[in-house]
Image (spheres, helix red, strand yellow):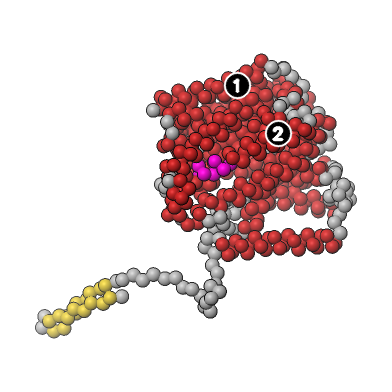
């Protein structure tokens, strides 16, 4: 069967690679075509590419693992994240596209400054390269894990193959090669996950069998409320919402928006994006739940749920198709992230390289090698090969750095270099401290599934710095809301009351319905005590005199 899987894998991977290499026929040897495809991409292609790039290895590997661990309550991640993405597409992407075309910028780091190469643009570019390299490393790790499970190849081999493909994609046609390949992958991804989900649900006995299987393992898996949250339900959901909003802070996704020609194209792309992504999220969720029922070993790696499920339930051609989809999606996403790093370096860190096409390609090669080194190094660090952890750190790190600055600029606020740099440093520091300090100090992680992801402290620190500078720094404009007027005391009071009511309602519902939450029975005047009785029978023999004995039996 392994030969059949290998043949199928190479066949589908060859199709994906062929589509990307075909872009060489229409490319132009300019850095503008290399990084933003001449700003003439079709909305459907840009949207399908955004779906593939935004989800990629995270959805195939990381999200399946998170669903495996959390159960039904993962629905809050899907809902809150989708809502955040919708807001990003409707308002922030409109601003990004308008500013990008007006100023002819090709990198997200240039958008958070008044001009390319400004001090704040340089810092944003450096932080972009750092987090995008981590993100690209997560994609290479995803591909390595998929090859390890399905073909038995060492993860290191998969990572190195991925490096070669990433460089080939970049050199073949730049971002156009990535977008074309992504569009084909999105089609194969949706078909493959539909087939796999159908087979998996059949194996677990349908929806009723799925529910019964989860219930038999742990009733908390079938609850819509997660158990034992460290910071409450409202903060937990807010972190997912901000994670969705963070899509506007992902340079590799924003680059797709920059390839569009008009606002009408952006609106069409937004429809394509959500029509394609929503069913994909639903299918992946059921695959994650089914893998929890089918793979119950205590040493099972949750992130291997999808490839293991494909191995156990699909024929060789289907396994090869799924493997090729995972591998190609992760590689083209890594390619997009490497190109985004290239744009940040050539446009902001070293602007003199902006129009040097040969140097731009050398930068691409160096960045790809750096991301590969991170991925390989993660294999030898405990927990360093967790795709979910790597993606969470990168996504929320980038989102915390860029989204607050994009929001205040969308509102018409014009921060100077000091103001912008302070916001970025605050966000970066908060994300790093929140994510890494507990493990260094030997404390319980606060960014795990029962804590809150770093989007809340990261963006919170950035906005806190913004308001502090507005109120206490003379060189920063006083009104933190830009072109919008400061709310009156009455409006602010009512807003606070409504916010507290919403938070109170969410926390009250959580305390009532969450697994493990305790409440007093309204019909009882006291507390309900649950206990169990264990029968214990003991026998004892006592010497009395002259060899006589007495035996007694006790039942407890």
- Residue located at (87% from left, 52% from top): 485
- Residue located at (59% from left, 35% from top): 56
Residue 77 spot, x, y in % from top left: 61, 48
Q: Estimate the spatial distance between the alpha carbons at disc 1 and disc 2, rounded to whole Å.
A: 21 Å
> Disc 1 designates what residue?
19
467, above or below 527, in the image: above
- Crowd tier of the residue under label 2, counting other residues whose Cα lies within 10 Å: few below 14, some 14–19, many 20 or above: many
Q: Is 408 inside the magenta-drawn segment?
A: no
Residue 393 spot, x, y in % from top left: 62, 43
Q: Which residue lies furthest to the top in this view?
A: 25
Can you tell which mark lies on residue 269?
Answer: 2
Look at the image and give the residue range highlighted in magenta: 281-288
- Residue located at (43% from left, 46% from top): 205
Residue 499 seen in the figure = yes
Residue 330 spot, x, y in % from top left: 57, 32
Q: Is residue 68 left or right of residue 279?
A: left
547, above or below 285, in the image: below
In the picture, residue 373 is in which quadrant?
A: top right
Q: Is 285 inside the magenta-drawn segment?
A: yes
284, above or below 484, in the image: above
**Numbered disc in front, either 1 or 2:** 2
292, above or below 22, in the image: below
Residue 141 seen in the figure = no
* SS majority, magenta: helix
Foreground residue among 536 and 78: 78
């Amino acid at each position: 069967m392994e030969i059949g899987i290998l043949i199928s894998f190479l066949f589908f991977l060859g199709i994906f690679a062929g589509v990307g290499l075909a872009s060489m026929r229409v490319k132009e040897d300019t850095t503008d075509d290399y990084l933003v495809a001449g700003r003439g991409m079709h909305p459907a292609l840009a949207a399908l590419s955004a779906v593939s790039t935004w989800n990629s290895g995270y959805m195939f590997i990381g999200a399946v693992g998170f669903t495996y661990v959390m159960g039904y309550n993962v629905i809050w991640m899907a809902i809150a994240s989708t809502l955040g993405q919708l807001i990003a597409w409707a308002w922030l992407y409109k601003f990004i596209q308008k500013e990008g075309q007006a100023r002819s910028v090709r990198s997200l780091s240039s958008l958070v400054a008044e001009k390319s190469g400004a001090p704040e643009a340089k810092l944003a570019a450096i932080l972009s390269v750092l987090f995008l390299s981590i993100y690209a490393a997560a994609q290479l790790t995803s591909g390595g894990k998929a090859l390890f499970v399905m073909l038995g190849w060492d993860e290191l081999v998969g990572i190195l193959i991925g490096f070669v493909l990433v460089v080939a994609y970049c050199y073949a046609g730049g971002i156009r090669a990535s977008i074309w390949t992504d569009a084909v992958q999105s089609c194969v991804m949706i078909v493959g996950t539909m087939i796999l989900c159908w087979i998996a649900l059949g194996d677990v006995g349908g929806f009723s069998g799925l529910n019964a299987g989860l219930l038999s393992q742990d009733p908390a898996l079938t609850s819509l409320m997660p158990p034992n949250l460290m910071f409450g339900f409202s903060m937990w959901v807010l972190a997912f919402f901000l994670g969705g909003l963070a899509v506007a802070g992902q340079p590799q996704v924003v680059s797709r928006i920059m390839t569009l020609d008009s606002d009408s194209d952006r609106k069409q792309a937004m429809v394509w994006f959500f029509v394609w992504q929503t069913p994909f999220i639903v299918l992946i969720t059921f695959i994650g739940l089914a893998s929890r029922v089918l793979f119950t070993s205590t040493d099972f790696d949750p992130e291997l749920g999808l490839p293991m499920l494909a191995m156990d339930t699909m024929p060789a051609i289907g396994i090869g198709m799924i493997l090729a989809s995972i591998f190609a999606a992760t590689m083209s996403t890594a390619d997009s992230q490497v190109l985004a790093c290239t744009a940040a370096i050539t446009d902001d860190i070293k602007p003199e390289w902006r129009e040097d096409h040969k140097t731009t390609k050398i930068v691409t090669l160096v960045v790809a090698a750096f991301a590969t080194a991170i991925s390989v190094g993660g294999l030898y660090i405990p927990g360093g090969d967790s795709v979910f952890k790597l993606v969470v750190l990168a996504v929320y790190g980038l989102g915390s750095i860029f989204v607050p600055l994009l929001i205040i600029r969308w509102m018409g606020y014009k921060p100077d270099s000091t103001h912008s740099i302070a916001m970025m440093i605050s966000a970066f520091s908060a994300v790093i401290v929140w994510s890494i300090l507990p493990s260094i100090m030997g404390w319980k992680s606060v960014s795990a599934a029962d804590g809150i992801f770093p989007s809340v402290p990261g963006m919170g620190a950035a906005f806190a710095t913004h308001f502090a500078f507005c109120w206490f720094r003379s060189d920063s404009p006083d009104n933190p809301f830009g072109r919008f007027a400061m709310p009156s005391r009455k409006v602010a009071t009512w807003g606070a009351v409504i916010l507290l009511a919403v938070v109170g309602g969410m926390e009250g519902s959580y305390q009532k319905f969450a697994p493990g939450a305790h409440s007093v029975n309204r019909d009882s005047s006291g507390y309900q005590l649950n206990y169990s009785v264990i029968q214990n029978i003991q026998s004892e023999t006592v010497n009395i005199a002259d060899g006589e004995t007495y035996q007694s039996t006790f039942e407890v």
